[in-house]
């Protein structure tokens, strides 16, 4: 029989009409967070749900991933590897957060989006649609990355920026302020796009 990592404390709560159960780690009696069912948190590995975090629906947390504080993981989302989701962050839909990625603050990752590598998504940032954010990137502030957009390398996207469509931001590029990057644009190298800039249609910006 599989070794069990946790059991239920017997405490439950209703969360938007869903009954969630509090967990406790068997090895040290450490009280954990809240899950709907055992399939939400793998018994193998070091993955854990703590604090007031909620994991429900068909979401899965496994590997060495950590979901803590007031974070929510739901839908069919997966959080795995060494990923961390904390603060008031939400990961839902079919989203995947993995590798060493961290999602924190009030950030949302949703849809079919994938956030991985050593990426940081924080503040009020949103990554959704089929977007990919990876590498050593940082998406924060009120920035949105959506559509089929990709942010990679060491790029930073912040402020009220919108990166969408098939746009790509990579290398050491920085996009901030109220800038908009969309369509099939590419911003890479050491480029900086900021202010009220609009970058549209097959443009390449680099230094």
Image (cartoon, rainbow, N blue to C red):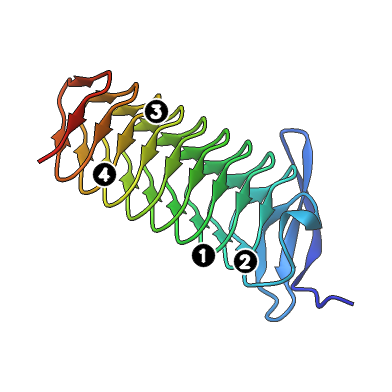
Above or below residue 180? Residue 93 is below
Location of mark 4 (residue): 156
Tell me which numbered mark, 1 or 4, is placed earlier along the sequence: 1
Helix, strand or loop at disc 4? Answer: strand
CA gap between label 4 and label 3 equals 17 Å
| Residue at the image position 14 percent from the left and 39 percent from the top | 191
Q: Residue furthest left?
A: 207
Helix, strand or loop at disc 1? Answer: loop
Location of mark 1 (residue): 82
Tell me which numbered mark, 2 or 1, is placed earlier along the sequence: 2
19 relative to 181 in the view: left or right:
right
Location of mark 2 (residue): 63
| Residue at the image position 73 percent from the left and 62 percent from the top | 23
Residue 87 % position (x, y)? 47, 50
Residue 162 % position (x, y)? 33, 26
Residue 68's quadrant in the figure? Answer: bottom right
Helix, strand or loop at disc 2? Answer: loop
Tell me which numbered mark, 4 or 3, is placed earlier along the sequence: 4
Tell me which numbered mark, 2 or 4, is placed earlier along the sequence: 2
CA gap between label 3 and label 1 equals 28 Å
Residue 135 % position (x, y)? 36, 54
Q: Are marks 2 and 1 in contact (CB under 8 Å)?
A: yes
């Amino acid at each position: 029989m599989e070794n069990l990592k946790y059991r239920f404390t017997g405490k439950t709560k209703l969360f938007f009409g869903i009954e969630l159960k509090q967990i406790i780690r068997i090895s040290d009696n450490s009280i954990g967070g809240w899950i709907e069912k055992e399939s939400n948190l793998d018994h193998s590995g070091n993955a854990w749900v703590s604090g007031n975090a909620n994991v429900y629906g068909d979401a899965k947390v496994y590997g060495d991933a950590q979901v803590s504080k007031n974070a929510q993981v739901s839908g069919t989302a997966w959080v795995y590897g060494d990923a961390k989701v904390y603060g008031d962050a939400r990961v839902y839909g079919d989203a995947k957060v993995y590798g060493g990625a961290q999602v924190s603050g009030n950030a949302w990752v949703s849809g079919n989006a994938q956030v991985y590598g050593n990426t940081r998504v924080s503040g009020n940032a949103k990554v959704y649609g089929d977007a990919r954010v990876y590498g050593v990137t940082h998406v924060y502030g009120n920035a949105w990355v959506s559509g089929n957009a990709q942010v990679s390398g060491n790029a930073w996207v912040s402020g009220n920026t919108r990166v969408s469509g098939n746009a790509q931001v990579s290398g050491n590029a920085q996009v901030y302020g109220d800038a908009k990057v969309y369509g099939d644009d590419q911003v890479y190298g050491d480029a900086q796009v900021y202010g009220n800039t609009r970058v549209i249609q097959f443009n390449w910006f680099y230094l």
